[in-house]
């Protein structure tokens, strides 16, 4: 029973690799290293440099390694970038996933776990945590590209012997609690990573995008989930499918929202650095408030969060960022030049 992890050299994928090692699972990693890092895949784990869009190559890899389950992370993840370059997202997240699903069908893979996103909901029409049966109305090409793959997977599973779990991530953040891997991608845009870069001096300041939202402090609200809890949900999904589970979609979050300002304050408090924060215009494509109803994940997959505290998320993210600054990580990371994007 070999698991294939696509995107296993990336941020979430590399945490999945450690989760599988911790559970003594047999698995291989496929990554094209477009944004991932070779060093993020530990020694002894097979890393195959390949593109998931290359269907015939993927079929060969699957057959050769006896893959029976695919955990599919590979893709592009930045909402604003998807608005500027939609075709990149329809290629990387939709077209390439189509080819991977086709390779799975051709080779008889029975199980797939797919990384989807809260961005499929768009602006929720109801207040409070969103459940999976809410209206799906993505407002960015990123969200649409992921929803298209959800639908492809659903339809393909109806026509073939393929079962799946779709996990809709809310805001994934933090780094491995044992310090083994973290979020290393250069040119970060995600809030907690950006704030940690400001706290460690890689940026001279950061911006808060929009302070006039209809929220208690005027900034957007998000549901942040620690990356170790997220990958543990994937492990539960693998077990669910192995135990005969068939087709299942669930939100991944903590059902609790924090505002952008609360997050920035937390990073300043924990780092002890009151870095400069610039209040600026709203960012295109941002949704005012997004929190997850996670009852499905907890009841059907029997998942329980272990690190559901904003302080833990920030502490682990900061620890990783400090390692990167001190250069105690792999040389490729330490050598990266960090450009200060904030004027
Ligand atoms: N933000 C800032 N300053 C920054 C970066 C972000 O104010 O420097 C704000 C954003 O405007 C937004 C919030 O922080 O209001 C969160 O932004 P992120 O870029 O961290 O994350 P997004 O909510 O845009 O997107 C993330 C994932 C998506 C997922 C979505 C679901 O990237 O995959 O969460 O909530 F769909």
Image (cartoon, rainbow, N blue to C red):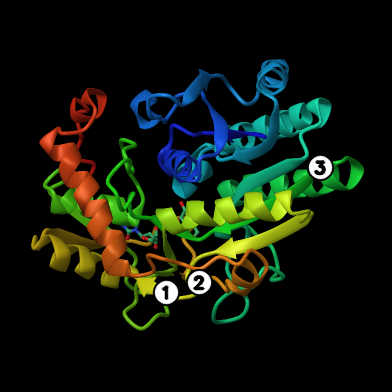
Contact check, label 2 and label 1, Cβ < 8 Å? yes
Question: Which residue is labeled 3 in the image?
Answer: 162
The residue drawn where x is 34% and y is 70% is: 309
Q: Quadrant of ligand 1?
A: bottom left
The residue drawn where x is 58% and y is 74% is: 293
Question: Which residue is labeled 2 in the image?
Answer: 291
On whether ligand 1 comes within 8 Å of the CB at mark 3, the answer is no
| Cα–Cα span, label 3 and label 2 | 30 Å
- Evaluate whether residue 161 shows in this view: yes
Label 3 vs 1, first from the N-terminus: 3
Q: Closest to the observer: 299 or 24? A: 24
Graded by Cα atoms within 10 Å as few (under 14), some (14 to 19) or many (20 or more), the crowding at tag 2 reads many
Place of residue 195 in the rendered image (x, y in percent of width and height, measured from the top left): 23, 55
Label 2 vs 1, first from the N-terminus: 1
| Cα–Cα span, label 2 and label 1 | 6 Å
Question: Which residue is labeled 1 in the image?
Answer: 257
Graded by Cα atoms within 10 Å as few (under 14), some (14 to 19) or many (20 or more), the crowding at tag 1 reads many
Q: Is residue 85 left or right of residue 258?
A: right
């Amino acid at each position: 029973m070999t698991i294939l992890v696509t995107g296993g050299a990336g941020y979430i994928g590399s945490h999945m690799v450690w989760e599988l090692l911790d559970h003594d699972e047999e698995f291989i990693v496929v990554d094209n290293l477009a944004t991932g890092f070779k060093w993020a895949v530990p020694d002894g784990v097979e890393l195959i440099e390949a593109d998931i869009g290359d269907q015939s190559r993927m079929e060969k890899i699957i057959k050769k390694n006896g893959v029976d389950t695919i955990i599919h992370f590979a893709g592009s993840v930045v909402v604003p970038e998807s608005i500027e370059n939609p075709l990149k997202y329809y290629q990387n997240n939709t077209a390439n996933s189509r080819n991977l699903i086709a390779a799975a069908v051709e080779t008889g893979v029975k199980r797939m776990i797919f990384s989807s996103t809260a961005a499929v909901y768009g602006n929720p029409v109801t207040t409070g945590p969103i459940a999976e049966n809410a209206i799906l109305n993505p407002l960015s090409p990123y969200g649409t590209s992921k929803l298209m793959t959800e639908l492809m997977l659903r339809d393909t599973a109806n026509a073939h012997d393929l079962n799946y779990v779709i996990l809709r991530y809310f805001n994934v953040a933090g780094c491995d609690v044992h310090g083994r891997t973290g979020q290393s991608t250069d040119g970060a845009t995600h809030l907690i990573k950006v704030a940690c870069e400001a706290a460690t001096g890689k940026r001279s300041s950061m911006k808060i995008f929009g302070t006039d939202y209809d929220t208690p402090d005027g900034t957007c609200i998000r549901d942040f989930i620690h990356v170790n809890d997220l990958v543990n949900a994937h492990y539960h999904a693998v077990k669910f499918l192995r135990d005969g589970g068939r087709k299942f979609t669930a939100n991944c979050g903590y059902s609790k929202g924090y505002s952008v300002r609360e997050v920035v304050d937390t990073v300043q408090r924990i780092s002890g650095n009151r870095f400069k924060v610039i209040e600026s215009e709203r960012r295109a494509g941002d949704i005012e408030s997004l929190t997850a109803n996670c009852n499905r994940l907890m009841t059907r997959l029997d998942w329980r969060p272990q690190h559901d505290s904003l302080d833990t998320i920030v502490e682990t993210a900061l620890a990783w960022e400090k390692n990167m600054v001190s250069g105690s990580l792999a040389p490729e990371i330490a050598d990266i030049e960090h450009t200060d994007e904030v004027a």
